[in-house]
Image (cartoon, grey):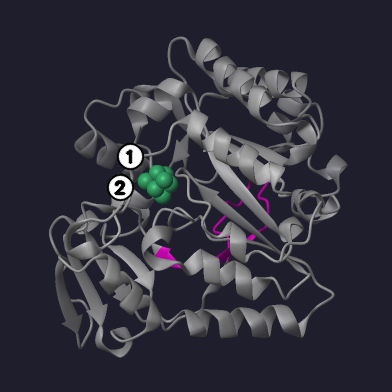
């Protein structure tokens, strides 16, 4: 199927892009050429200097940028709480979906969709880091500053990335998303070194707070397709949100997981209660006046972030952990940014007993023998 001028029809969440900015240095790059073929109609502006004035309606503007900094970064975890120690491959910033709770709204100054259009520099940096130290394992992901796959139909970047990383046995890549795009699968050399991951939530939260995202059913069908192709998948209940009737809704989601996936097909499952810097509350109030969860009972934690009162948090996380354990996912569970005390109350064990969260997740990511070598 094609859109105007013979360009293929893009997913709905990309059809609103009305303007493209491109740095002069990358305007003829393969990535820019690919985007030009798919978005021939929007205004294209070539930038010869820095972007000084931020365009209005930034979320409709795609900026193909030459990234001059480092691409591989430590995850901006939180002091005082148990962090999982993985590294971010920085491929771009912002996201065309509009989840009401999205932390990126407070993290970045603008909403412009930025894609680094010099991936050869990215690949060179990764190759030098991963190749220099083949005995050291790296657990990496692209889904921190953007959704890993939301721009994939335009950029094709993940396809290229998995192809490049396939040479490194010591690297496991997680692709975290709220959309369904499996176009990268054919480029994977080792299915046991790529972890497709989807966010999970209550069905009503997906419907009301994750505008533009794929339904839970669609995400789980995609997860099953990956699992049947030999990948193990990850699931992230983050943010878990408190609302009247949450038990029924979250219980339903766990049932759906059990209907789609077998325990051995799941590498790990995270649970994280909604938390944010206080500044995000005002942004959510202004941009998403219909969202009610922001008025729940929050306290400010040791790291300055707002969190749900501990007893409520523990009750919710325990409920979810219990349901997930009942479908065989006990070994896979971990908590995001919680203290030892909450770990003990929710999962009955501490991070220390697991040998450290980073180590534990690394073992789970690399641990199980892959069921297939592709290609
Ligand atoms: S999918 Fe992720 S990055 Fe995109 S708006 Fe939602 S929370 Fe933010």
Q: Which of marks 1 and 2 is nearer the N terminus?
A: 2
Is residue 313 shown left or right of residue 49? right
Point 75% across, 48% down: residue: 357
Which disc number belongs to residue 13? Answer: 2
Which disc number belongs to residue 38? Answer: none
Residue 89 sits inside the magenta stretch: yes
**Mark pair 1, 2: CA separation:** 6 Å
**Residue 375 higher or lower than 95, as above or below:** below
- Does residue 235 appear in the picture of this structure? no
Which disc number belongs to residue 212? Answer: 1
Residue 45 lies, in percent from the top left, at 15, 77
Is residue 293 shown left or right of residue 149? left
Range shown magenta: 74-92
Front residue (pair 29, 129): 29
Residue 232 sits inside the magenta stretch: no
Q: Does the residue labelled 1 lie within 8 Å of ligand 1?
A: yes
């Amino acid at each position: 199927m094609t859109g105007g001028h013979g360009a293929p029809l893009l997913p709905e969440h990309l059809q609103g892009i009305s303007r493209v900015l491109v740095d002069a240095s990358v305007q003829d790059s393969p990535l820019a050429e690919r985007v030009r073929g798919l978005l021939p109609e929007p205004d294209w502006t070539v930038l010869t200097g820095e972007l000084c004035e931020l365009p209005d309606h930034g979320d409709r503007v795609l900026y193909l940028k030459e990234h001059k900094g480092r691409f591989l970064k430590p995850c901006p975890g939180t002091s005082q709480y148990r962090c999982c120690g993985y590294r971010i491959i920085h491929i771009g910033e912002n996201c065309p979906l509009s989840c009401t709770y999205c932390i990126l709204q407070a993290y970045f100054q603008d909403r412009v969709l930025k894609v680094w259009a010099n991936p050869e520099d990215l690949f060179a940096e990764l190759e030098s880091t991963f190749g220099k130290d083949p005995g050291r394992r790296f657990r990496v992901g692209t889904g921190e500053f953007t959704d890993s796959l939301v721009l994939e139909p335009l950029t094709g970047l993940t396809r290229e990335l998995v192809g490049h990383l396939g040479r490194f046995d010591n690297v496991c890549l997680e692709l975290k998303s709220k959309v369904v795009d499996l176009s990268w699968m054919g480029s994977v050399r080792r299915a046991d070194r790529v972890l497709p991951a989807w966010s999970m939530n209550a069905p009503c939260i997906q419907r009301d707070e994750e505008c533009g995202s794929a339904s839970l059913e669609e995400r789980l069908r995609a997860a099953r397709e990956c699992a049947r192709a030999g990948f193990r998948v990850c699931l992230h209940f983050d943010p878990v949100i408190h609302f009247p009737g949450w038990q029924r809704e979250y219980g339903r989601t766990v049932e759906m997981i059990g209907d789609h996936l077998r325990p051995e097909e799941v590498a790990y499952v995270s649970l994280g209660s909604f938390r944010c810097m206080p500044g995000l509350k005002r942004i959510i109030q202004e941009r998403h006046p219909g969202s009610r969860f922001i008025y729940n009972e929050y306290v400010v934690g040791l790291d300055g972030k707002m969190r749900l009162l501990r007893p409520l948090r523990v009750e919710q996380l325990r409920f979810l952990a219990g349901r997930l354990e009942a479908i065989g996912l006990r070994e896979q569970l971990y908590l995001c940014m919680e203290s030892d005390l909450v770990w003990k109350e929710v999962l009955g064990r501490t991070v220390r007993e697991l040998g450290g969260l980073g180590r534990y997740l690394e073992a789970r990511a690399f641990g199980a023998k892959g069921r297939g070598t592709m290609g």
